[in-house]
């Protein structure tokens, strides 16, 4: 099972993630937020309040989380300016 072991918040809702098998990529989180309780994550201060949860995924302060296997399957951004 994939687990995020490192991440870095980039600009425009992009996050660089590194998995426990060494795979790294930049993913765009914007399509996953903005409705319901994820709307508050559109504010930069709230978006930055993310940690790695015990299952190896990403979790925000409001309880929204993204499974590491789902993150692994998201398409990598081909170009991103940090």
Image: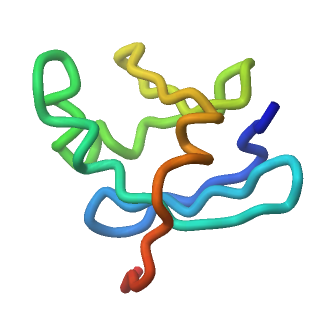
Image quadrant containing the N terminus = top right
Give the residue at x 17% y 43%: 42
Image quadrant containing the C terminus = bottom left
Looking at the image, residue 15 lies above or below residue 59 = below
Number of callouts: 0
Q: Work out which residue is located at the far right of the displayed protein and give it.
A: 21
Expressed as whole percent of the image width and height from the top left, the position of residue 43 reads: 17, 43
Looking at the image, residue 46 lies above or below residue 76 = above
Q: Nearer the viewer, residue 26 or 61?
A: 26
Q: Quadrant of residue 25?
A: bottom right
Q: Nearer the viewer, residue 37 or 73?
A: 73
Q: Is 73 left, or right, of 61 in this rendering? A: right
Q: Is 80 left, or right, of 1 in this rendering? A: left
Colour mode of the rendering: rainbow
Q: Quadrant of residue 12?
A: bottom left
Give the residue at x 33% y 69%: 11
Give the residue at x 57% y 60%: 8
Expressed as whole percent of the image width and height from the top left, the position of residue 26 reads: 52, 66
Q: Nearer the viewer, residue 16 or 31?
A: 31
Looking at the image, residue 66 lies above or below residue 15 = above
């Amino acid at each position: 099972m994939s687990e995020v072991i490192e991440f870095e918040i980039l600009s425009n809702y992009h996050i660089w993630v590194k998995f426990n098998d060494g795979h790294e990529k930049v993913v765009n989180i914007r399509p996953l937020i903005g409705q319901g309780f994820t709307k508050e994550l559109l504010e930069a201060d709230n978006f930055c309040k993310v940690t790695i949860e015990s299952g190896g995924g990403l979790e925000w302060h409001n309880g929204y989380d993204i499974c590491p296997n789902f993150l692994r399957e998201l398409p990598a951004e081909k170009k991103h300016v940090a």
